C-alpha cells in the first residue's frame, strides 16, 4: 500500500513540476513582446536589445528545462 502511495505522489509531483515548463513558455512570450515593442519604438537599440533578450531567453529556457527534467525524474524513478 505504501509503494502505491509513493508512486501516486511522484506522479502528482511530476504534474506540478510540468507547470514550470508552462511558466517558462509564457515568460518567454511576454519577453519577446517587450523586445519587439522596444525595437519598434527605437530601432537604433536593436543590437543591444537583442543581446539582452538572448541572455534572458536562455535563462527562461534553462528554468523550463530544469522543470522538465524534474518531472521526468519523478515519472521514471
Image (cartoon, rainbow, N blue to C red):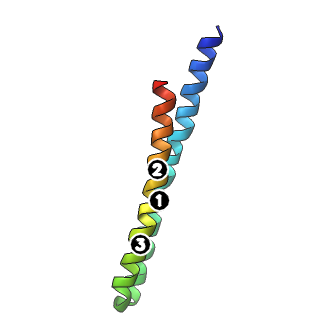
- The residue shown at (49%, 60%) is 27
Say if residue 49 shows up in the picture: yes
User: Real-space Cα distance between discs 1 and 3?
Assistant: 10 Å
Which residue position holds label 3?
Answer: 53
CB atoms of marks 2 and 1 within 8 Å: yes
Disc tally is: 3
Percent across and percent down for residue 66 are 48, 46
Which residue position holds label 2?
Answer: 64
Instruction: Give the side of residue 73 with respect to residue 7, left or right.
Output: left
Q: Earlier in the sequence, mark 3 or mark 2?
A: 3
- The residue shown at (54%, 26%) is 11
Considering only vertical position in the picture, is 49 above or below 9?
below
- The residue shown at (49%, 53%) is 63
* Secondary structure at numbered mark 2: helix
Which residue position holds label 1?
Answer: 60
- The residue shown at (39%, 83%) is 48
- 10 Å crowding of disc 2: few (<14), some (14-19), many (20+): many
Percent across and percent down for residue 35 are 41, 76
Q: Earlier in the sequence, mark 1 or mark 3?
A: 3
* Secondary structure at numbered mark 1: helix
Closer-to-camera residue (65/29) = 65
Instruction: Give the side of residue 3 with respect to residue 20, left or right.
Output: right
Amino acid at each position: 500500500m505504501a509503494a502505491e502511495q509513493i508512486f501516486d505522489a511522484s506522479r502528482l509531483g511530476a504534474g506540478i513540476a510540468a507547470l514550470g515548463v508552462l511558466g517558462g513558455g509564457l515568460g518567454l512570450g511576454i519577453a519577446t513582446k517587450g523586445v519587439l515593442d522596444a525595437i519598434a519604438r527605437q530601432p537604433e537599440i536593436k543590437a543591444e536589445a537583442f543581446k539582452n533578450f538572448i541572455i534572458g531567453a536562455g535563462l527562461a529556457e534553462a528554468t523550463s528545462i530544469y522543470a522538465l527534467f524534474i518531472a521526468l525524474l519523478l515519472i521514471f524513478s
